[in-house]
Image: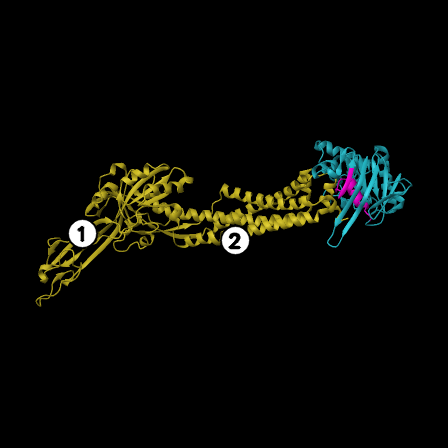
Chain colours: A cyan, B yellow
Amino acid sequence: MYELTNVTKTYNTTKKKIVALDDVTLSIPDGQMVAIQGPTGGGKSTLLQMLGALDRPTSGDVQLGSSTLSKLGDHRLAAIRAKEVGFVFQGFNLIPTLTALENVETALAPLPGSGADRRQRAQDALASVGLGDRLTHLPAELSGGQQQRVAIARALVKRPDVLLADEPTGALDEETRDEIMDLLESFWRDQGLTLIIVTHDSGVARRAERRLHIKGGRVTELAGQPA
Amino acid sequence: MFGTYLRRELVNRRKQSLIISIGMALAIGLVILVNSISGGVQNAQAAVLSSVYGVGTDITIHQAAAAPTAGANPGRFSFGSGTGETSGGTTTLAQSTLTTSRTETVFAATDLDTVKATSGVQAATGTLSLTNMTFNGQLPDQTQTGTTGGTEGTGTAGQPGAEAGGTRPSGGADGAGGSSFDVDNFSVLGLDPSGASVGPLSAVTLATGRLLTAADAGTDTAVLDASYATSASLATGGTIDIGGTTFTIVGTVSSSGSDSETASNVYIPLDVAQTLSSNAGMISNIYVTAASSSGVDSLASALQTALPAATVSTQADLASTVSGSLSTASSLVANLGTWLSIIVLAAAFLIAILFTISGVTRRTREFGTLKAIGWSNRRIVSQVAGESVVQGLIGGVIGIAVGLVGILIVNIVAPTLSGSAAATTAIGGGASGGRSGGGFGAAAKAVATTVTLQAPVTLGIILVAVGLAVLGGLLAGAIGGWRAARLRPAEALRSVG
């Protein structure tokens, strides 16, 4: 469960101070599917980075389960990202020199386990996203939808508690978008994940059980629930 | 994962890997070649020096030549009024003197005991460097020319008798009061006949007969330099006049190095040399072999302390006395070669560092993604450093091959270098005096040697090459890794998102 309390994040540029998150207080229960919408520069990605232990707030607390992310050091944050949080990016962010199987294995590298075990789990993860026959393909040899499936397999192979998706369908056509969303939704339901999706796409957002809107760093609830 | 990722990066980014590796290979190859040639030049210098000082001589000790005392003239011939045989108005004179070389100062042989007692000395031997001068000629009978003759010791040898009382001179070499004579000199080295493990005779090859042995002590036996024997029409089994004493020639020796003479023209037992030259209990040089090659400098210091009046020279000091094209090659390698290696090595390191940094910058999103999925900074730094080290090692391996090919070419071409070192001469303060070998009365003999440059390949050179390759890779990897570690995952992802 996420608990954000008075979270503020500011960036200082040479010209001015940018408030990316402005005193955000938010609670996200385990297993919830949340969509975050808002205009470009509204603070969506910054909020996702706070939730994903990629960055620390300037002030306020971010709590994930029993861990206060805002107070942990880099090493501990890396460990939480390695075990508890999965990421899916708009641009897939696969390692171009590694095969699909090896890309999935990178998520298991920081975790204990033998090479054979890692390989088997990566194969299973790729099979679960329908790419059991694409193990040795490089990203450049896969379509956009297939690359995003590999990215989803990489995010889920470690069986995280939370899956954070930053515009996961932003680079895909409509048909592929629906396929990817179906896939994410099925994993959310089957594995009891907390799924948080940042999206511009209202069609994607409507599939979530809870929708948040963020603008000027402030979060508001869209489906009638208070933030 | 580390190995798989590393291999994929090297294979799939082969252009960058190739550029870094080739840069490193050229640098490593050049370092190997320069080091090897440097080793070859040092070996050549050692060959030249060994022809003078003997194999295994780490240190030589002598005393710098002192200014002669007033009235002293050891090279002077003295003829009394009744000297020589006079017949038909012509006096035939022949005299041989054995004196200390002008460039040498003798010192007590007890100093050798001091040297032997010094810790770190494996072996030591003393020699006495001498010059034998022979006067052989015909002068007009002084009583016929009517001159009163000069005071013994002040006349000028060979000066025709002055006319007196209007009487034309007669006799002499031309029957008209003229003179004809030869003055010959050759170097003589008195040495311990039983101690061939160190000293000048340790570097010679027996040409004919035999070397001196312990049994020759006190006997009038001599070993000749083969080149000198040929030029003087002497041979084993014959005799040679040294200081008025007839010596039996028991053997001839030549230098182990190609095309060179040995340190002296003639070798005789030390005790005989001391007696004949009136230098009883004196020596002029000590040759020392150190117990440990790494302890030569400290031993030289200890010997200098033990013998404050002496000049103690190590092989390194002696190497500076080698002249000729060998000296030029040595300077070239030491200056141009070394600096070229350093510059190319620095350029290769710089290329590796810049390419690695450029690679890290290009892979910002990649590293940001890896951090996002839980890779620690240490894991990412290891990955970047590992890639750089392997690129360096590949460059090192290619560089070793390049270097070996270069060495092979040098050894096939086998350039000939000539060098000369002053034999039986003062090193350091007295070195310049010794270069005028062959001068009247000068004992110093410049031993010219022609050596073929052979660049050796040693394990040390290979290890240095591998070490440099790893160092270059580590340096590039450390800097590249540091850059990667500084990337904050959020910023890394934002910068490309």
Residue that badge 2 annotates = B340
User: Both on one chain, marks 1 and 2?
Assistant: yes
Say left or right for A92 vs B350.
right
Q: Nearer the viewer, residue B261 or B371?
A: B371
- Splitting the image into 4 quarters, where does residue B236 fall? top left
At label 1, counting other C-alpha atoms closer than 10 Å, the crowd grade (few under 14, some 14-19, many 20 or more) is some
Asked if the magenta segment contains residue B49, the reply would be no
Which residue lies most toward the right here? Answer: A224
Q: Nearer the viewer, residue B104 or B139?
A: B104
Q: Give the magenta-colored segment's residue range.
A: A42-62
Residue B115: x percent and y percent?
32, 39
SS type, badge 2: helix
Residue B398: x percent and y percent?
58, 46
- Splitting the image into 4 quarters, where does residue B211 fall? top left
At label 2, counting other C-alpha atoms closer than 10 Å, the crowd grade (few under 14, some 14-19, many 20 or more) is some
> Is B143 rendered above or below residue B9?
below
Amino acid beneath label 2: Leu
Task: Choose the circle earlier in sequence order: 1 or 2.
Answer: 1
Residue B216: x percent and y percent?
25, 38
Q: Mark 1 falls within which chain? A: B
SS type, badge 1: strand
Residue that badge 1 annotates = B95
Residue B108: x percent and y percent?
26, 42
Residue shown at 47% from the left, 47% from the top: B455
Amino acid beneath label 1: Gln
- Splitting the image into 4 quarters, where does residue A116 fall? top right
User: How far is the residue under mark 1 from the one under mark 2?
Assistant: 60 Å
Quadrant of the image containing the N terminus of chain B: top right
